[in-house]
Image (tube, grey):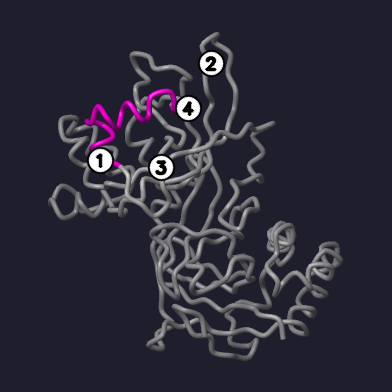
Amino acid sequence: MRAKSRWIPVRWAALPGFEDDTLFEAWNAWLKSCARPGPVFAKLCSEVRRLSIGSAEEQRTWLLQRLQPYRVEDLSGNDNGLLTAYFEPVLEAMRTASVNFTVPLYRPPSGLTQRQPWYTRREIDTSAVAQAALHGHEIAFLANPIDALILQIQGSGRLRITEADGSQVWVRLAYAASNEQPYQSVGRWLLDQGALRDASWPAIKSWATQNPLRINEMLWSNPRTVFFREERLPDRDADSGPRGAQGVALTPGRSIAVDPLSIPFGTPVWLASSGPNVKLQKLVLAQDTGSAIVGAVRADYFVGLGAAAADFAGRLKQPLHLWVLWPK
């Protein structure tokens, strides 16, 4: 039993679709976890590496021999949960502010203390003291405040930054810190206002275009903001995801964010979810977390980068079942 979950041992036959998964895709994510394994899985990593060139049959046989599946439940015995998805935005930016690029993205300011609330999003936008504390910490400027909000919620993103001399460089902005304020969904705020019936990002952006004088009101409904660090990207390889909370690069379609009080980082997990948009039955790795990912049977599914991933992530919200695969 974990702090927020209990694990019930089951037979492998209880895992839907186990015989059909293309395991080699998950093995790539597992190899990344082996760069920073926890003590439980470190002893298996030599075997995981050896099997990276094995057949799917060999990999499946090894799983059966070495691991025990456990159904994940909350402390009341409920094994039904929620699956959502997240992605890595790809955005245009300027190194310095211009007429069209006015929305700053910041490094962590000095004086920021972990677990101590700093200025709210509204105070950051309106308080001279907060703005003075952030002066000189600008990384780049975006054109759209909704894109900045999405970037902060996703926790990382790729920017094509135009430098002051006109040259361009691809960088990744990775999560560095937050203002330790509570996260509030702007989509929920719009639904409560009766402004929308569909709180997808396309609908939110459309509402913002039609209601420019209320954009700040919407943004300020979420007091939480995120600060970033800049990482250079040698290329735009879509397979090179951002680093998750485990400290390893995420793999599209094979990495999930979890509540670490339910499932430890680096744990292989069998995920099953069916809904109107997609049916998933596959091996994934718990490699990340997020402020909204709370509870026993809760996962955020990393789907990659760019517009197609954004569209998929924006539509995915469906029932979930999880099984952790733990060494015997």
Q: Amino acid at mark 1?
A: Leu
Dot 4, how many residues are within 10 Å of its Cα: few (below 14), some (14-19), or many (20+)? Answer: some
Q: Which residue is mark 3?
A: 112
- Which residue is nearer to you in this view: 184 or 272? 184
Task: Find out whether residue 129 is within the magenta segment.
Answer: yes
Local secondary structure at mark 4: strand
Q: Amino acid at mark 2?
A: Glu
Local secondary structure at mark 2: loop
Q: Which residue is mark 2?
A: 163
Q: Sequence order check: which comes first, mark 1 or mark 2?
A: 2
Q: CA distance from mark 1 to mark 2?
A: 28 Å
Q: Sequence order check: which comes first, mark 3 or mark 4?
A: 3
Q: CA distance from mark 3 to mark 4?
A: 17 Å
Quadrant for the C terminus in the image: bottom right
Q: Sequence order check: which comes first, mark 1 or mark 3?
A: 3
Residue at point 70% right, 75% down? 40
Q: Position of residue 121 (x, y in %)?
A: 28, 40
Q: CA distance from mark 4 to mark 1?
A: 20 Å
Which-is-in-front pick, marks 3 and 2?
3
Q: Which residue is mark 1?
A: 219
Local secondary structure at mark 1: helix
In-image side of 148 versus 164 (left or right): left
The stretch in magenta equals 119-137
Q: Which residue is mark 4?
A: 139
- Which residue is nearer to you in this view: 63 or 247? 247
Q: Amino acid at mark 4?
A: Ile
